[in-house]
């Protein structure tokens, strides 16, 4: 299916990111008064009037970045322009025509692609009259909008879809793509891995820490199967956060983890595992997400580094992640990357697996017989029955006599027993313990596990 691409361009601080968020009705791009916040191409698919298109936000043309990555930003802008079916050139009605607006207009005029001139920040009727000034740019009729107030949103979307060629752009039902969030501390190699998967310079790679700020969704395919990789900002210790941009970058990392089907926690082999790595792994655990620990830059680690010793080191530094598999890669050479994505697929399959009630209760009965929870005030624990209620993560309800007898240590024990005996070997499992009062009263003959004997609860 042909998917039109609409690229938003303009000088810094005219509201390009706000316009993307307005049209998407979601907070996708970071919006901040600081110049140069958007650096990579940030994209989202939008459906309007049964027409689907991809909308791309870009960095500001003419950005003067204190971290000296202006050239890399401009490369990303040029790629987005060349791919565009339609360009939205955004200007600021309050500033009027600036010299940089004129330079941008000259650049776009040479490209000779369909273009709409968007005059942003028209928050009051008086500004609509001022839009006529922008006819001087020679790029057609200015369209007044207010991205923050969503003024002119529907009219703009109507105009956008009317400019697409007369071919089928209607959404086609397809299987949802598996989403893989790639997270880690700064300079762990996340963007390099994304570009290797996408087989293009999809996001900026720089030695400067903190280059990536937005969470960027990137589609890629391996052996004909499509995936979505989510590139995220590198995480720092809270006391080292320099501004609100880095703070919101952290919140986007957490949102990306929640959105993901599988999370890749990228570990920088030459550097020690830090509190930041531990903080990220702790958040992944709270969300019960399948997590693949991927060791990057293994090719430049110490020559005498032993894989088995490093695995022990990782599990010691990231407690509670012992079930998460490790993969060693080199993004520069491409070594083991396809195998890593295949492993992520297998983990996704595990997370979507259901087992029969009979299988589940057989394993739990054996586990309960081998090791029972500690008594509480002489009260003996009993498990009457268990069932799997959902997937992603696999979730189990155990009907018990007193849920206070089943603490987090025993939950970990049950998780390990299920992972050893059922097809959940590398993913987190979730348990709910329901007291006797909530047990299904119709199942009066259901057995409970106690003293190696099958007994009847009535």
Image (spheres, rainbow, N blue to C red):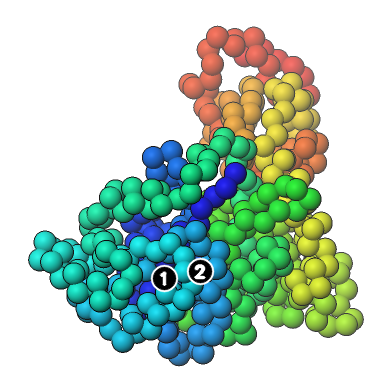
Place of residue 202 in the rendered image (x, y in percent of width and height, measured from the top left): 61, 68
Can residue 115 be spotted in the picture? yes
Place of residue 333 in the rendered image (x, y in percent of width and height, measured from the top left): 81, 73
For label 1, the crowd category at 10 Å Cα-Cα, with few meaning under 14, some 14 to 19 and many 20 or more, is many
Please name whichever residue, 314 or 230, is drawn nearer the observer in this view of the structure.
Answer: 230
Depicted 284 relative to depicted 392: above or below: below
Q: Quadrant of residue 452?
A: top right
Please name whichever residue, 414 or 234, is drawn nearer the observer in this view of the structure.
Answer: 234
Which residue is painted at 69% across and 30% down in the image? 354
Which residue is painted at 27% across and 64% down in the image? 141
Please name whichever residue, 457 or 199, is drawn nearer the observer in this view of the structure.
Answer: 199
Q: Are marks 2 and 1 in contact (CB under 8 Å)?
A: yes
Q: Secondary structure at mark 2?
A: helix
Place of residue 49 in the rendered image (x, y in percent of width and height, measured from the top left): 39, 40
Which residue is painted at 42% across and 74% down in the image? 109
Can residue 321 be spotted in the picture? no
Quarter of the picture holding the C terminus:
top right
Place of residue 113 in the rendered image (x, y in percent of width and height, measured from the top left): 46, 65
Q: Which residue is mark 1?
A: 9
User: Residues under labels 2 and 1: Cα distance?
Assistant: 8 Å
Quarter of the picture holding the N terminus:
top right
The circle on residue 81 is: 2
Q: Quadrant of residue 251?
A: bottom left
Task: Give the farthest residue toward the left.
Answer: 126
Depicted 333 relative to depicted 128: above or below: below
For label 2, the crowd category at 10 Å Cα-Cα, with few meaning under 14, some 14 to 19 and many 20 or more, is many
């Amino acid at each position: 299916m042909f998917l039109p691409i609409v690229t938003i361009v303009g000088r810094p601080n005219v509201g390009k990111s706000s316009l993307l968020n307005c049209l998407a009705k979601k907070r996708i791009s970071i919006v901040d008064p600081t110049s140069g916040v958007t650096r990579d191409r940030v994209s989202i698919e939008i459906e309007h009037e049964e027409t689907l298109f991809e909308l791309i936000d870009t960095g500001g043309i003419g950005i003067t970045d204190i971290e000296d990555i202006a050239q890399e930003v401009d490369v990303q802008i040029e790629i987005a322009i060349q791919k565009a079916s339609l360009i939205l050139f955004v200007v600021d009605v309050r500033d009027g025509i600036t010299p940089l607006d004129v330079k941008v207009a000259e650049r776009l005029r040479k490209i000779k692609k369909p273009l709409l001139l968007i005059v942003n920040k028209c928050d009051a009727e008086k500004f609509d009259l001022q839009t006529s000034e922008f006819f001087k740019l020679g790029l057609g009729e200015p369209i007044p909008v207010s991205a923050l107030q969503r003024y002119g949103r529907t009219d703009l979307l109507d105009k956008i879809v009317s400019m697409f060629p007369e071919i089928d752009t209607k959404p086609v039902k397809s299987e949802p793509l598996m989403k893989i969030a790639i997270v880690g501390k700064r300079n762990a190699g996340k963007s390099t891995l994304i570009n290797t998967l996408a087989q293009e310079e999809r996001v900026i790679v720089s030695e400067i820490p903190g280059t990536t700020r937005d969470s960027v969704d990137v589609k890629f395919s391996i052996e004909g199967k499509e995936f979505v990789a989510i590139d995220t900002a590198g995480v720092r210790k809270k006391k080292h956060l320099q501004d609100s941009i880095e703070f919101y970058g952290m919140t986007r990392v957490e949102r990306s983890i929640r959105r993901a089907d599988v999370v890749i926690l990228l570990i920088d082999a030459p550097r020690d595992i830090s509190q930041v790595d531990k903080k990220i792994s702790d958040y992944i655990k709270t969300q019960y997400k399948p997590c693949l620990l991927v060791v990057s830059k293994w090719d430049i680690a110490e020559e005498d580094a032993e894989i088995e010793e490093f695995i022990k080191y990782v599990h010691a530094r990231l407690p509670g992640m012992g079930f998460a598999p490790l993969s060693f890669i080199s993004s520069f050479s491409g070594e083991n990357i396809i195998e890593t994505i295949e492993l992520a697929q297998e983990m996704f399959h595990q997370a979507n697996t259901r087992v029969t009630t009979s299988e589940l209760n057989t394993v739990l009965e054996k586990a309960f017989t081998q090791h029972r929870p500690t008594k509480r005030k002489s009260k003996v624990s009993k498990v009457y029955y268990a069932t799997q209620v959902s997937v992603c993560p696999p979730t189990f309800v155990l009907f018990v006599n007193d849920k206070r007898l089943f603490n987090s240590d025993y939950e970990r024990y049950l998780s390990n027993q299920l992972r050893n005996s059922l097809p959940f070997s590398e993913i987190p499992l979730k348990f709910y313990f329901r007291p006797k009062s909530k047990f299904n009263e119709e199942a009066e003959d259901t057995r409970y596990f106690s003293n190696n004997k099958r007994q009847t609860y009535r």
